[in-house]
Image (cartoon, rainbow, N blue to C red):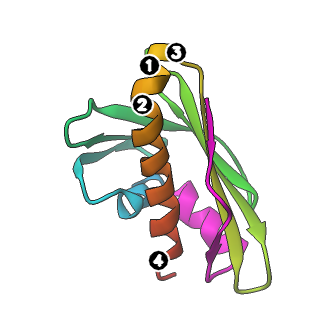
């Protein structure tokens, strides 16, 4: 399953967006309103839970300066990645696309596709609202 958001304009440089996404604690600012838990485990991992959903631990797998940050699920039970792809569109503006990828059985995919799509789009929308 692959879910891609459209590119979202962010009113700051690609370097600032990268630095923001590369700092795990900043993901709390992007979470939807229905978040019930957010906890930074270390510099590379955080845990979050949305109301009515199980806790998920994400870890930073890879980061390429000013280009992307790749997070992945820390558990093999629900294997997926979330990538923040960054493009410069000027010295004080950039664009970000979030890409969710995971392999799930058909039943699981049917159950999670809509909530995951909404979640990823909310992250992208909230990123566009951040004051840098």
Q: Position of residue 122 (x, y in %)?
A: 44, 59
Which residue was labeled with disc 3?
106
Which residue was labeled with disc 4?
129
Circle 1: element type: helix
Residue shown at 70% from the left, 86% from the top: 92
- CA distance for labels 2 and 3: 10 Å
Q: Is residue 19 above or below residue 93?
A: above
Q: How many marks?
A: 4
- CA distance for labels 3 and 1: 6 Å
Q: Position of residue 74 (x, y in %)?
A: 46, 26
* Of the two numbered discs 4 and 2 in the rendering, the one whose residue sits closer to the viewer: 2
Q: Are marks 2 and 1 in contact (CB under 8 Å)?
A: yes
Horizontal placement of 15 versus 113: left or right?
Answer: right
Which residue was labeled with disc 1?
108
Mark positioned earlier in the residue sequence (2 or 3): 3
Which residue was labeled with disc 2?
112
Q: The N terminus appears in which quarter of the rendering?
A: top right
Circle 3: element type: helix
Mark positioned earlier in the residue sequence (4 or 1): 1
Image quadrant assignment for residue 115: top left
Q: Is residue 17 above or below residue 63?
A: below
Q: From the viewer's side, name the closer residue of 112 and 80.
A: 112
**Residue 67 highlighted magenta (yes or no):** no
């Amino acid at each position: 399953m692959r879910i891609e958001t459209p590119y979202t304009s962010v009113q700051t440089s690609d370097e600032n967006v990268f630095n923001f996404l590369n700092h795990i604690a900043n993901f709390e600012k992007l979470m939807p309103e229905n978040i019930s838990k957010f906890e930074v485990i270390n510099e590379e991992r955080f845990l979050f839970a949305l109301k009515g959903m199980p806790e998920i631990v994400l870890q930073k797998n890879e980061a390429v300066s000013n280009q992307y940050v790749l997070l992945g699920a820390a558990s093999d039970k629900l294997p997926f990645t979330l990538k923040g792809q960054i493009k410069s569109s000027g010295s004080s503006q950039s664009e970000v696309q979030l890409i969710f990828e995971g392999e799930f059985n058909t039943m699981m995919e049917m159950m999670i596709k809509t909530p995951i799509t909404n979640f990823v789009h909310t992250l992208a929308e909230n990123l566009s609202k951040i004051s840098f």
